Image (cartoon, rainbow, N blue to C red):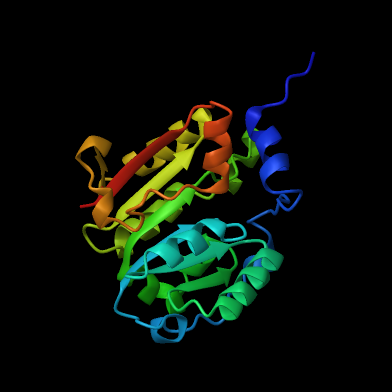
């Protein structure tokens, strides 16, 4: 009997058929859209900035932005339709501390015009990224050694990285990749003060809510740039 992996079941349930496999290595993502300045993105460009990579439809960021107005939130998503819809919602709701960018996060953050984003980040989150189960597709995973090197060379000291997934193999892969970089150190969750973070109220993603309801394991870790 074939047993479907919990991740695949949850994808169908949560995304309501919206999640489509998009090859991040496609040449379609080589051209970067013009990135607006922080003052064009946000009402108060001096607020702390958090980046969520692979934000999907942005529900998590909308929830955060509405309850934590002292922070600015930026989402990067590779599916253009989701980004367009999210931007429309931001305009309709007149939210001043939330912005979305379409494209491949690796390409965007490695582009000269985007360096100001990395320099101003206080934290980054990778929530339940696509695991790309087949070994030949591991190179499509968002966290790659080259990408972590970009972050380690550009992030300010003290910047935090949060990873979270329900796929143990993916967690081990991400943890090894980040921990192998000399400039990132793991933080013990017991010593971490969420009240001072981008998510003081511990808002959960749709995916996380589903995983909890179905009593599946969640693997997560926090790193700090040293």
**Is 118 above or below relative to 136?**
below
Q: Residue 200, can we see it?
A: yes
Tell me which residue sits at (42%, 80%) in the image.
42
Residue 113 percent coordinates (x, y): 45, 79
Tell me which residue sits at (60%, 66%) in the image.
103
Spot the residue most to the right: 1
Residue 20 percent coordinates (x, y): 73, 51
Taking 31 as reference, is 98 left or right? left
Residue 130 percent coordinates (x, y): 60, 44
For the image shown, how many numbered marks are present on the structure?
Answer: 0
Tell me which residue sits at (38%, 59%) in the image.
150
Taking 222 as reference, is 87 left or right? right
Decide which of 6, 30 is in the foreground and name it: 6
Identify the image quadrant of the N terminus.
top right
**Is 182 above or below relative to 113?**
above
Residue 12 percent coordinates (x, y): 73, 41
């Amino acid at each position: 009997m074939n047993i479907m992996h919990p991740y695949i079941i949850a994808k169908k349930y949560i995304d309501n058929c919206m999640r489509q496999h998009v090859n991040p290595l496609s040449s379609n993502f080589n051209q970067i859209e013009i990135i607006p300045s922080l003052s064009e993105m946000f009402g108060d460009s001096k607020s702390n900035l958090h980046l969520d990579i692979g934000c999907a439809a942005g529900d998590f960021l909308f929830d955060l932005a509405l309850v934590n107005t002292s922070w600015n939130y930026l989402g990067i998503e590779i599916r253009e339709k989701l980004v367009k819809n999210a931007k429309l919602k931001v305009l309709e709701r007149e939210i001043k501390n939330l912005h979305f960018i379409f494209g491949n996060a690796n390409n965007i953050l490695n582009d000269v015009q985007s360096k100001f984003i990395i320099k101003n980040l206080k934290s980054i989150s990778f929530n339940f990224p696509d695991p790309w189960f087949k070994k030949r597709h591991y190179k499509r995973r968002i966290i790659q050694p080259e990408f972590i090197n970009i972050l380690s060379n550009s992030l300010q000291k003290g910047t935090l990285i949060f990873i979270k997934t329900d796929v143990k193999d993916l967690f081990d892969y991400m943890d090894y990749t980040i921990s192998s970089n000399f400039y990132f150190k793991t933080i013990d969750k017991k010593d971490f003060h969420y009240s001072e973070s981008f998510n003081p109220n511990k808002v959960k993603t749709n995916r996380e809510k589903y995983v909890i309801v179905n009593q599946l394991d969640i693997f997560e870790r926090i790193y700090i740039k040293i």
